[in-house]
Image: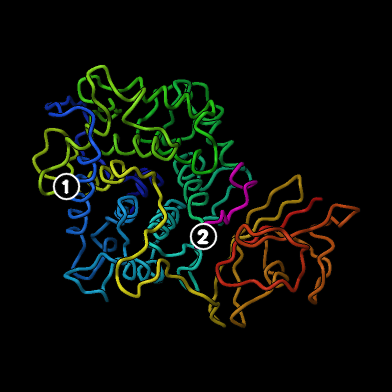
Amino acid sequence: MTATRTVPARRALRLAVPAALGALVLTAVPASATSTPAQIATSKSTGVSYLRSLQAADGSYAGSGLSNEWAFSAFAAAGTAAVDVTPGGDATKNARTVYRNLLTGSAWPGGSPVVTDYERGAINAYSAGVDPARVSASRNLIADIYGYYQSAEPGYWGASANFNGTVFGLIALAGAKTQGGAQRVPQALLATSVATVRANQHDDGGWNYSKAEGDPAKLAAASDIDMTGAAMASLCTAGVPNTDLAVTKAKAFLKSKLINTSGAFDAMFGVNTDSNGWAVSGLNACGINPQTGDFLTKAGKTPVDFLIAQQFKPGGGFKYLPSDTSPSAYASIDGLRAVAGGGFIAAPPAPTTAGAPQWAATTAFTPGTATRLALTVDNGTTLKVCAVTFTPTAATTTLGTVLDAATGCVTSVNPASGSGTITAVNGTANSGGSTWKSSVDGAGAIAASRGTVINAGDTIALKYGS
């Protein structure tokens, strides 16, 4: 969606909140109790139909005046491939191709971009079936995010004051697996942001969009339902189990906000679909059933009941407020994703369009076209994170070439040329059983060599140790 700069990082990612933010009351109680599998299936089907209706005639969901790209994460959660979403059946304008073209263009993401622009792009590209590291020969969204790592405040992505940039950075980097389903980003890097998310958890168990770490007053402030769901999702997407104290405290916070008669969460902005959708997506990402146990009220209502009650029938769109008389695109995206059981990112389903692959990705560098690669250099004490910008001269390159261009991460490499085994980086030399090893896209580590072939979009981890 188009970023609004008044609160840059949050508005760049938020699915939008209408202007009326006063306390709201639920005006209608859902007619049924806990939603049945049949009701959920109907909600998903009609919700997908409504989101299909939002597609522009040119096939787009994002661009000038149109900001519904989060529909891709909702489509994927509901089992619909973006490549199968076409305007009037015109496969040449399928949603995936049009979105990929947008991300590839020089005009995207516009002037003065913030980290959440790239995080939003990576999350939705992945959900749409576009490898975010291989959008094009010049666009690598994983590397773009790496460029916003805060070396002076390890674990934060983008301005630390806008904590939501770190939350969605963790979701994007941990959730956007390789095409084969492997974790491409080293766990050591994810762990730095996991620690940061933990440090920003408020005393009440939730989170807000702004930084609270180290500030007792902010940590004691009331949390936001929306960001609590997103922060939970970031932890669990990065591998934190739902039995972890940070997750159980967040779960207890959400439980404390349940409204008995409706199953809705009493959010900071009042009862609304977006806040409930974010909270449920957080629970989904952590494998916590939002329809049983702590989230089934004494009146027999759940958050999913509330969301389905917000959906127009038979149209399939969701309203933002219970009192609204027409659907909201953002509420419909949030509502569908949550009801479908999705977190904030989902692997793309297999397409039904004949001949359409599950993934769209560039396969080689274009000689003479500047590009970026994501690189970490870990000497066992310090972890350096870089977006390496260089101009390839062939369809592939070498690890030595990447390290030579890695200003900010690499100050020296031995040997300084050739294709041999790397024996020292930044003054740390191989010694005894401790040596430099490299890993690409999460694959097994091998002895680091200047001659190791690097392909377009590879995420490179260089690590010293036994």
- Residue 117 in the image: state x and y as whole percent: 41, 55
Q: Is residue 166 magenta?
A: no
- Secondary structure beneath dot 1 equals loop
Residue 163 screen position, x and y as percent: 47, 39
Q: Is residue 232 left or right of residue 41?
A: right
The label number, if any, that marks residue 144 in the structure image: 2
Instruction: Identify the residue at horizontal 18%, vertical 43% (top origin).
Output: 318
Q: Residue 181 magenta-drawn?
A: yes
Location of residue 420 in the rendering, given as x and y in whole percent from the top left corner: 82, 72
Question: Which residue is farthest right?
Answer: 432
Up-down relation of residue 454 to residue 309 (above or below): below
10 Å crowding of disc 1: few (<14), some (14-19), many (20+) = many
Q: Secondary structure at mark 2?
A: helix
Please tell me which residue is depicted at 62% across the width and 78% down the height of the picture. Answer: 396
Residue range of the region highlighted in magenta in the rendering: 178-191
Residue occupied by mark 1: 317
Residue 100's label in the rendered image is none
Dominant secondary structure, magenta: loop
Whichever of callouts 1 and 2 sits on the residue coming sooner in the sequence is 2
User: Which residue is more in the foreground, 321 or 312?
Assistant: 312
**Residue 169 makes an appearance in the image:** yes
Q: Position of residue 18 (x, y in %)?
A: 21, 40
Q: Residue furthest top?
A: 298
Is residue 25 left or right of 418 when viewed as pictured? left
* Structural distance between the alpha carbons of marks 1 and 2: 34 Å
